[in-house]
Amino acid sequence: MRARRAPGRSPRAWTAWSRIALSLGGVVAFAVLLEVVARVGFANPDYVPYLSQTLARFGALLLEPEFYGQVLDTMSGFVVGIVIATLLGVALGVLFGLWEITYRSARTVIEMVRPIPAVALIPLAIVLFGTNLGMKTIIVVLASIWPIMFNALYGVRNVDPLMRDMARSFGRSRLDVVRSVVIPAALPMMWAGVRISSTISLIVVITLELYLGGSVGVGGMIAEARAGGNDVLSAYAAIVVAGVLGLVVNVALGAVERRWLAWSTTTKEG
């Protein structure tokens, strides 16, 4: 006879709460370590302020209306860039994965362009496109398209040929097989590429804003704080903002993955 489970939270719920507790514990431990390092004199407080002071300045930023406009500038460049990179990367990855001859014909160009750091193209992009959102988008796309494209390529190649043959045996056209069999089967690897590229995109956007200076975006906040009176606290608070944005993006993409790709073995293992 099967024993009844005691009332309370399910094992799955406890596992979720334990993951959250461990994550928060790691954050708290890291914060305490930074505070102790600053207070015992391992670092010059003029250049490395106390974490408590930085967090207080971060809290003050949240009360400033213009702060949200700067965050919006950064996130708009990030979102537009990663969406275009995803569309192009998936399209090219599927094309190269289905027809190897297309990849072989483009491989030399890809291997020449891929190692070029996107930030090295910033001066050229400024000359050609100015300092508007279009220039920022182009740099983000050039930096983040590669993980998406190659993940899509290998995801398509890893699809079981028997699945495609079975779909064709039921009278499906090639295009229909790609749409209903190949792309869904490769979607977990494609999404993994998007998650990798999202981090790259956010780094590039903030680096670009830092390079341009001014007060545009989170990177502009760091540059302005560093140049205008050497406001160390504001610079570190802006760095905290960048970290929080990266965490929010990663959590959001992970939630989408768990919600829509829960059937994937890769997702479950991750």
Image: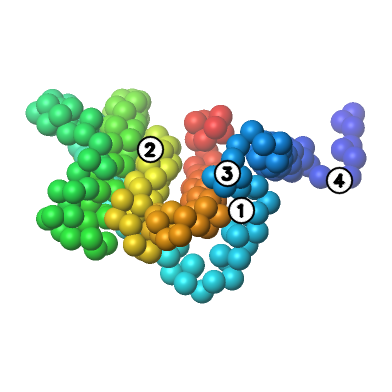
Q: Residue at x 64, y 33 (%)?
A: 42
Q: Specify which label sits upstream in the sequence, 4 or 1.
A: 4
Q: From mark 4 to mark 1, how far is it between C-alphas? A: 40 Å
**Mark seen at residue 193:** 2
**Residue that carries the numbered disc 3 in the rendered image:** 48
**Foreground tag (2 vs 3):** 3
* Amino acid type, callout 2: Gly
**Mark seen at residue 54:** 1
Q: Secondary structure at mark 2?
A: helix
Q: Specify which label sits upstream in the sequence, 2 or 3.
A: 3
**Residue that carries the numbered disc 4 in the rendered image:** 8
Q: Secondary structure at mark 4?
A: loop
**Foreground tag (2 vs 1):** 1
* Amino acid type, callout 1: Thr
Disc 4 crowd, CA 10 A, few/some/many (<14, 14-19, 20+): few
**Foreground tag (4 vs 1):** 1
Q: Residue at x 27, y 62 (%)?
A: 133
> Considering the image in quadrants, where does the N terminus appear?
top right
Residue 12 or 165: which is nearer the viewer? 12
- Residue 30, image quadrant: top right
Residue 117 or 54: which is nearer the viewer? 54
Please indicate, yes or no, whether residue 60 appears anywhere in the rendered image: yes
Q: Residue at x 65, y 59 (%)?
A: 56
Q: From mark 2 to mark 1, how far is it between C-alphas? A: 33 Å
> Considering the image in quadrants, where does the C terminus appear?
top right
Disc 3 crowd, CA 10 A, few/some/many (<14, 14-19, 20+): some
Q: Is 118 positioned to the left or the right of 268 in the image?
A: left
Q: Specify which label sits upstream in the sequence, 4 or 2.
A: 4
Disc 1 crowd, CA 10 A, few/some/many (<14, 14-19, 20+): many
